[in-house]
Image: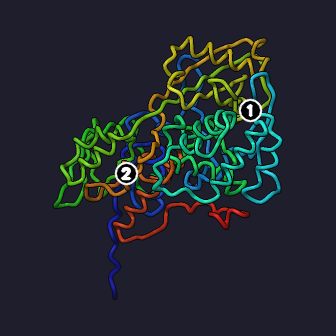
Amino acid sequence: MSTILKVPQKTVTIIGGGVAGMSAACALAEAGLSVHLVERRGYLGGRASSYLHPGVNEVIDNCQHVLFGCCTNLVGFYRRIGVDDRIHWTSEMTMIEPGGRRSLLGPSWLPAPLHGLPKLLSAHAFSLADKFALARAFSALMRPVPASSTESLGAWLKRNGQTQGAIERFWRLVIASALNAEIDTIALPYAAKVVRELFMNSAFAGSMGMSTVPLSQLYLGVSPLLERQGGSVLLNTPVEGAEWDEETSQWSLTTQTGSLISDFLVLALPFEATAKMIPHLPPAEGAEVLLSQTENQEHWPICSVHLWFDHEITELEHAVLLDREIHWMYNQSRLQTGRGGHYIELVVSATRAFAALNREEAIRQALEELGEFFPRVREAKLEKVALVKEVLATFGVPPGIDASRPSAVSPWPNCFLAGDWTRTGWPSTMESAARSGHLAAEALCLNLGDPRAILEPDLKPEGLMRIFG
């Protein structure tokens, strides 16, 4: 009679409980590994989380985060933890000029990439010259921009005859804001990817999704999923160092509360936290290269102003605000289920000037500008307000940045890298973070002889874009 040998379950420790770490952890648990997710803070989510703000006694997101239909790996992560039904999807975007005039962008019955053309042509926000300029730019982007291009978005816009209106109201506000950087500091391939994914490939790819619950509530399914495979989530657990044991082929992590032993290690950290961790890891060939890659990264801030009024100032769920410092308006009382009061969140991205303002100046400017778009603000009573400055919100994507984005394979044995800043092909987004987690999980499984596909496939271009995809 043959004997069935039971292979011991492999263990993984993941340092970092942001979207990258969570997506890697859940994918590896689903693959049958025992995963311990270690986070130094008392909550999951990293830069995409929520918390009880003591100044207003309200649970707020550290900043409004959105996803799009093309974010297949983020959607896959949400599906894995059972919260994909808590995303509110919309295919339309309202642009408002100071004074209140509105323009509506969104899809039509036409095939991609023409589906957005009818509403763009009827948009009051753009002059006829602006519309012709945008049409020329979209035509030029029908074919993918080579990833090796070293041209900046700003240089490309000048070369392709973009009008000032098109630059200010589309390229700077919509595209540069989405990438959270100034147009002259954005690599053309990343800007082109955003345009193609959101406006050209298909109507669904550009649809926008927003959480109907505070962000941290989305992650409540992570811990049960890990526990089913013998894993856990360890909060308030800073990691002080890690050692590799050649004899046992295991990692030993030192924390403030004890030690963790595991077969594999995943560093799912932002680039500056990775840089701080490297000196506490064993010497390894390639560690200095990785350290230099982290030093080539640069942060850009995002600010959000949270306002509670005594009555509703707009029926809109969200809007793009033109020609002012505030860029995006989210009506959280309408977007988030069970949210009481009249709660508006404003987001200011791609600017360091607003982030440099003190609290009183920032709030005063935000309120004055909001009143230009929604006159009811002037009649409403402001009940409470919170200002959140995420100084380390995103990393920049200037020309040549790909050389400083490492792969999922690290210089150390049985150790892998994740984080939105690693080589995912995407800019600094939740989708990039989720992709990095899935890429790290794939690389780890391959190390075990399990070549499973974890990375979610991209959406296929539709309509005429199937020819140019």
Residue 445's place in the image compared with 62, above or below, is below
Label number found at residue 403? 2
Q: Nearer the viewer, residue 183 or 445?
A: 183
Q: Quadrant of the C terminus?
A: bottom right
Q: Secondary structure at mark 2?
A: helix
Q: Secondary structure at mark 1?
A: helix
- Which residue is at 80% across, 29% downward? 315
The first of marks 2 and 1 along the sequence is: 1
Is residue 267 among what the camera can see?
Answer: yes
- Which residue is at 64% across, 15% downward? 384
Label number found at residue 373? none
Q: Nearer the viewer, residue 280 or 190?
A: 190
Question: Within the image, what quadrant is residue 55 found in?
Answer: top right
Position of residue 273 in the picture relative to residue 131 (left or right): left
Residue 80, how many percent across, how many down?
A: 56, 55
- Which residue is at 72% across, 22% downward? 341
Position of residue 450 in the picture relative to residue 191 (left or right): left
Residue 31's place in the image compared with 307, above or below, is below
State how far apart marks 2 and 1 are (Cα): 43 Å
* Residue type marked 2: Ala
* Residue type marked 1: Arg
Q: Which residue is mark 1?
A: 334
Position of residue 407 in the picture relative to residue 81 (left or right): left
Residue 159, how many percent across, how many down?
A: 58, 45
